[in-house]
Structure formats: C-alpha cells, structure tokens
Amino acid sequence: MHNTIDIPADFLARSAIVDHDHPAIAALARSLAGANAEETARNCFDWVRDHIEHSIDFNRDEVTCVASEVLAAGTGLCTAKSHLLVALLRRHGIPAGFCYQRLLFDEAGAAFCSHGLVALWLDGHSWYRCDARGNKPGIQCEFTPGRENLAFAVQAPGERLYAEVWAEPWPELVSRTRALASIADYRAAPLDVAPPTPSAAASRHIGV
C-alpha cells in the first residue's frame, strides 16, 4: 500500500530506531492492514495508542526506545511510542516522521520535557500530525485527518510546538533516552532537548 506523492525516501526508510523490518513489527503491520492508506493508518494509530502502555500513566519502569523493543515490552514514553507508530506506518508504505513539543512536565512547572508526536502523509490531507501517547481522564486523542487532535495545547511560557517533521528522531533525545537506567530517572530529571541544528541533523526535515 503506497501513497503516490513525491515524498523524500527518508520518510519511508528503515533505521536503527525505526526497525520496521523486524519480524514482530512486520507481523503486527500485516494484521493492521485496512482497505486504504487512511484506514490502515487509523488502525496503526489506535493500536499503538491503546496497546502500548505509557510509562508514566501505568507506572512502568522499563526504558524502551527502538520500535521493536517498544513492541516487545508493551510500554514506552511518548517518544518511544512514536517510534513504533512510525515503524508500522512505514511498513505499509505510508510516509511518516517525527514531530515534537516542549511542554511543562507537571503542574508544578519546575521542569520541561520533550513530547513526541507523529506526522504522516495522507493523500487529500497533506501532512497530518497525531498523538498516540494514550488516552486517560482529561486526554482523548483520536485519529482525525484534517483536524489536529493533540493531547496537550501549548499554553505556558516556554512551551512550544515545533512545525517541522523530522525523518529521524532527534539524536540527542535518543541518546539520552537510551542512557536512562529507569523511568524513575526520567521522572526525576525529564528530558528537555533542543532540536538538532541543520548541520547536526541526522536526517532531513520538512515543514508541516
């Protein structure tokens, strides 16, 4: 299943983090196939949102990052869940990449964190940004192409929604995630990472 728009190959590529050729990801992707790209994308979004437990919401302490390890563990932070969703989408030939917000970590407002989103290209909708972090009281994210439906609005000073779609996750965010010994460490010091500079970026990015 492939879209016909001329999107750079980076947004369909396999990588060390987006290992969409892993047998478990390939098998799951097959089970989520729909009648068209939009239905398939919705199935992938719903599955990651509902079946992969958000580390904070479910008090899970395992640290995951690579898409296949997120699937195997059944848990991950928002960024890790985005890695799995992008892997499933790309497995189906749906161009997909990574978007980010900078948000306050909690109501105390003492720290910021980098929040991971996914953008995918659907014919008729252009790039569509979505948030599969998982629903809970006060958060209800659905797959609604043409109408953005994110978990968190940018409101407080210092918060930001980055307009770009990156073909690869931010390298510093990946390296700092993989350096965590546990989610308890993340709770104590949330990861607040700036976007890579154009010269340092691991892969190309485009605007939404």
Image: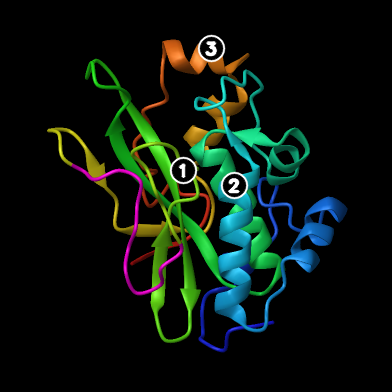
**Residue denoted by label 3:** 184
Q: Nearer the viewer, residue 206 or 28?
A: 28
Residue at the image position 39 percent from the left and 80 percent from the top: 125
On the image, the x and y values in percent for residue 46 come to: 57, 57
Residue at the image position 45 percent from the left and 15 percent from the top: 187
Q: Split into 4 quadrants, where in the image is the C terminus?
A: bottom left
Density class for disc 3 (Cα within 10 Å; few <14, some 14-19, many ≥20) is some
**Residue denoted by label 2:** 50
On the image, the x and y values in percent for residue 99 come to: 41, 52
Disc 3 + disc 1, Cβ < 8 Å: no
What is the CA distance from the residue labelled 3 to the residue labelled 1?
21 Å
Residue at the image position 58 percent from the left and 69 percent from the top: 41
Q: Nearer the viewer, residue 201 or 142?
A: 142
- The three-letter amino acid code for the residue at tag 2 is Asp
- The three-letter amino acid code for the residue at tag 3 is Ala
Q: Earlier in the sequence, mark 2 or mark 3?
A: 2
Disc 2 + disc 1, Cβ < 8 Å: yes
Q: Is residue 146 magenta?
A: yes
Residue 147 left/right relative to 27: left
Density class for disc 2 (Cα within 10 Å; few <14, some 14-19, many ≥20) is few
**Residue denoted by label 1:** 135
**Residues rendered magenta in the picture:** 143-154
- The three-letter amino acid code for the residue at tag 1 is Asn
Per the picture, the main secondary structure of the magenta-coloured stretch is: loop
Using the rendered view, name the quadrant where residue 72 is placed: top right
What is the CA distance from the residue labelled 2 to the residue labelled 1?
8 Å
